Image (cartoon, rainbow, N blue to C red):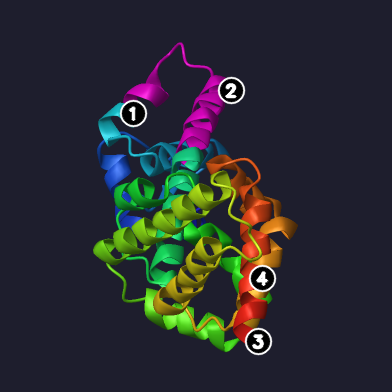
Amino acid sequence: MTVGEVAALAGVTVRTLHHYDRIGLLSPSGRTAAGYRRYAPADLDRLHRVLVYRELGFPLEEVATLLDDPAADPAEHLRHQHRLLLDRLERTRAMVAAVEKEMEARHMGISLTPEERFELFGDWLPEEYEAEAEERWGDTEAWAQSQRRTRSYTKEDWVRIKDEGEDVERRFAEAMRAGVPADSGEQAMDVTEEHRQQISRNFYDCPPEMHAGLGRMYLEDERFTAHYERIAPGLAQYVSTAVQANAARQAG
């Protein structure tokens, strides 16, 4: 093959092939009567190995050393390159995953660093549930409101929201431990109404009937149930009952 044909086949420039020839990295096996370079199949095999090592970041001098080692086994070269490519693939996948996380977070308006998100949310990140939430409620005004509001939230906003939520959960647990009836006790109803107002204030307008639906979900969705049960055994049922009772009271 001519130098032009090899360049087109390998996706490199003729100038690159000339340079490889000058430094002894890849010299064509033959020449025409007029002195033009002619590449044999073995030359193309070597070029392939050169390009793989170059793609992996090896300098040309090191590539030449690797390829010209008299003890080198061509099959071992392939195994070496294969291992290196797999390592690079894993690093690339990790980078892609990190970038996708950041894209999801920015789409949700969570303008926090990974460290800040871990500090605030631990191993639960809001963006992980965005696709599911959008599928269930993406065509609702509540979803649109939540997207508009959270898009502008800073770290300080999320800290405040997290603190408010934890305060409400603590007060729910205190009422339950004190034996306050979930469906009628004044203390339980006051905390429940604050829970509803917190949602309306920070995310979307949450009328009583919508709040009642959330209360049912706290028992129907095992992830919500587990969250409340970690705070205090039995709290998921207590909060669900209180939320639905408060919704009925508000409607009345």
Residue drawn 54% across the image and 83% down it: 142
Residue drawn 50% across the image and 41% down it: 89
Residue assigned mark 1: 64
User: In the rendered image of this protein, does residue 35 appear above or below residue 104?
Assistant: above
Q: Amino acid at mark 1?
A: Ala
* Mark 3 neighbour density, 10 Å: few (under 14) some (14–19) many (20 or more): few
As rendered, which of 125 and 4 lies closer to the eye? 125
* Mark 1 neighbour density, 10 Å: few (under 14) some (14–19) many (20 or more): some
Distance of label 1 from label 3 (alpha carbons): 84 Å
Distance of label 4 from label 3 (alpha carbons): 11 Å
Range shown magenta: 64-88
Residue assigned mark 4: 245
Q: Is residue 3 visible?
A: no
Of the image marks 2 and 4, the number of the one nearer the N terminus: 2
Question: Which residue occupies the extreme top position in the image?
Answer: 71
Specify the label residue 97 is tagged with: none
Specify the label residue 75 is tagged with: 2
* Mark 1 and mark 3 residues within 8 Å of each other at the beta carbon: no
Q: Amino acid at mark 2?
A: Ala
Of the image marks 4 and 1, the number of the one nearer the N terminus: 1
Q: Amino acid at mark 4?
A: Ala
Of the image marks 2 and 3, the number of the one nearer the N terminus: 2
User: In the rendered image of this protein, does residue 139 appear above or below residue 128?
Assistant: below
Residue 178 position, x and y percent, is 54, 46
Any magenta on residue 99?
no
Q: Is residue 100 visible?
A: yes
Residue assigned mark 3: 252
* Mark 2 and mark 4 residues within 8 Å of each other at the beta carbon: no
* Mark 4 neighbour density, 10 Å: few (under 14) some (14–19) many (20 or more): many
Residue 132 position, x and y percent, is 64, 66
